[in-house]
Amino acid sequence: MAWAIIVHGGAHTIPAEKIEPHNVGCTLAVEAGVALLEKGASALEAVEAAIRVLEDDPVFNAGFGSMLNSEGDVEMDAGLMEGEHLRAGAVASIRGVRHPISVARQVMEKTEHVLLSAAGAHHFAEQQGAELCAPQSMVHEDQRRKWEASNKKRGSDTVGCVALDARGTFAAGTSTGGIMHKMPGRIGDSPLVGLGFYADNSAGACSMTGDGESIMRLALAHRIVQSMQSGADADRAAEEALAVMARRVGGEAGCIVIGRHGEIGQAHNSVHLATAWRTSEMTAAIASVKKQR
Ligand code: GLY
């Protein structure tokens, strides 16, 4: 059966000199997922592998290089889901781990819970032998400079991935440092099932990026998957959800989607959306920083 994978590196305004690094980073991430899908690995494994690449790349606001909260600390949110049994795992406001997405997967696989936060999430990560690090080692100098230059709350260029594997199972995941100068303890849409990500084998899967406070109030990821369940294709479901958001609560966002038949979709109302994708029909990934028309 055919497989497909798409990643995003955030919906926001990308300066000209950062476009190529976004394309390169998204391509490397999607190829990490492809390497697994080609060997018959699950969509969940591919999603985790792709997001780990993005979390390591300081071009993106996730993992190393995350935006800093009002106290100058990195606090990260991440979550993932598989669409066969609707299992999900997530961490919120976690500090001192290299790969929040991998801790989220451990939450899904090793606990009876879906979401762990802050000190409890860190303690669990330690128990599981996750890669721990000094919280300050996750701070990249560019983010420190931006934090010092302005105390305005702004963001958000979350990362995410959606995949369909050869067995027909979907998975979706999202990871972020949230927004610059957020209040300590602020949690966005990214670690919340149905808000920042959703997967259901009966319809498809979706990962969101953008203004968490807008995305959350409309449960956008679930809305998009529901809309595909009702017959919309991936692009239309994505575009309609963002139109509803703009009309009802405002805000900027973007999303990546794979529909029931493996069709790839994306939409955004931010200036740019960075993505890369590949399917089993393609010999190389396509990366694009799409500009709003
Ligand atoms: N969409 C990521 C956030 O608002 O934290």
Image (cartoon, helix red, strand yellow):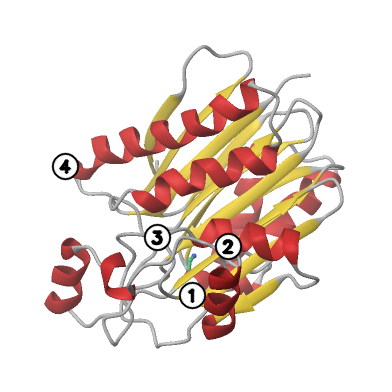
Q: Select label 4 or label 1 by which is in front.
A: 1
In the image, residue 103 lies at what x, y percent?
A: 58, 62
Q: Quadrant of the C terminus?
A: top left
Is residue 265 something that shows in the picture?
Answer: yes
Q: Secondary structure at mark 3?
A: loop
Q: Which residue is painted at 41% across and 47% down in the image?
A: 54
Q: Secondary structure at mark 1?
A: strand
Label for residue 103? 2
- Disc 3 packing (10 Å; few <14; some 14–19; many ≥20): many
Q: Which residue is painted at 63% across and 21% down in the image?
A: 38
In the image, residue 149 lies at what x, y percent?
A: 12, 75
State yes or no: discs 1 and 2 in contact (Cβ < 8 Å). Answer: yes
Q: Select label 3 or label 2 by which is in front.
A: 2
Report the Cα–Cα distance between label 4 and label 2: 33 Å
Report the Cα–Cα distance between label 4 and label 1: 31 Å
Residue ID for mark 1: 94
- Res. 117 image quadrant: bottom right
Report the Cα–Cα distance between label 1 and label 3: 10 Å
Residue ID for mark 3: 63
- Disc 1 packing (10 Å; few <14; some 14–19; many ≥20): many
- Disc 4 packing (10 Å; few <14; some 14–19; many ≥20): few
Badge 4 amino acid:
Glu
Q: Quadrant of the N terminus?
A: top right
